[in-house]
Image (cartoon, rainbow, N blue to C red):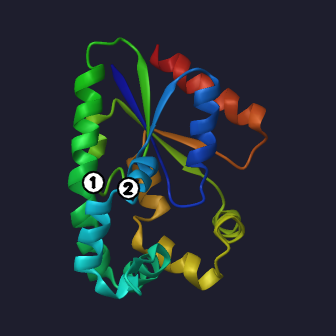
Amino acid sequence: MKLIAITGSIGCGKTTIAKELKKLGFTVFDVDGWVRRLYFKNDFINTIVENFPETAENGVFNKRKLRNLVFDDNKKLKMLEGLIHPFLNNQLKEIIRRNACYDDLFFLDVALLFEMGWDKYCDLVMVADVDAEIQKQRVMARDNVSAEHFEKINNVQMSQADKKALSDVIIETDVPLNLLKAQLISVIEGLE
């Protein structure tokens, strides 16, 4: 098993890279998807509401309130990560255990790769990259958020420059899909 990480800051194109890799027939594990599934588990929601009571409105959990709360308060963000990261670590270890016997390439789409220390499990780290202004416009349009909100989210993540410095390969995502695909194929051919 070779595990290849796809990382990068919000709006830099990780999802687009993941989609192209899936089209090429590769398995891509979506860590954000793992987190989204957590929010459908009642015991997890109960834990969130216990730790962040201000996210409940008339007894109903409000995910947007949680998002605003943690991006306004770094202490609360760390608290939330303390609830989510153990689950994610278990998921990753299970993926590695189940697939260790295969001689295939597997991809891991994960924004907080370095922050969680997962780069040590990866044979190669690719970082999605794009001009900062394009990144901001993408996020504002996609998530319907203000420039100020984008900055809050972006500022709690490791800087894109640091991610690039720690990565093995930089994939430019502000290119036509055929050129993006060519970049990916070139990386894959170098691994086989």
The residue indicated by pointer 2 is 112
- Seen in the picture, residue 77 relative to 25 is either above or below; the reply is below
Q: Is residue 31 left or right of residue 188?
A: left
Q: Give the crowd class for mark 1: few <14, some 14-19, many >=20 residues within 10 Å.
A: some
Q: Residue at x 75, y 44 (%)?
A: 175
The residue indicated by pointer 1 is 116
Task: Residue type at mark 2: give it.
Answer: Leu
Q: Quadrant of residue 170?
A: top right
Asked if the residue under mark 2 is in contact with the one under mark 1, i.e. CB atoms within 8 Å, the reply is yes
Q: Nearer the viewer, residue 18 or 64?
A: 64
Task: Residue type at mark 1: give it.
Answer: Met
Residue 24 bears which disc, if any? none
Q: Residue at x 31, y 61 (%)?
A: 42
Q: Nearer the viewer, residue 172 or 78?
A: 78
Q: Is residue 31 left or right of residue 22?
A: left
Q: Quadrant of residue 20?
A: top right
Q: Quadrant of residue 99?
A: top left
Q: Is residue 130 visible?
A: yes
- Helix, strand or loop at label 1? It is loop
Q: Is residue 146 left or right of residue 114?
A: right
- Seen in the picture, residue 27 relative to 172 is either above or below; the reply is above
Q: Give the crowd class for mark 2: few <14, some 14-19, many >=20 residues within 10 Å.
A: some
- Helix, strand or loop at label 2? It is loop
Position in image of residue 43 (x %, y %): 25, 61
Q: Nearer the viewer, residue 130 or 109?
A: 109
Q: CA distance from mark 1 to mark 2?
A: 6 Å
Q: Residue at x 39, y 54 (%)?
A: 35
Position in image of residue 98 (x %, y %): 26, 23
Q: Residue at x 49, y 80 (%)?
A: 152
Q: Is residue 117 visible?
A: no
Task: Please identify the quadrant where the N terminus is shown.
Answer: top left
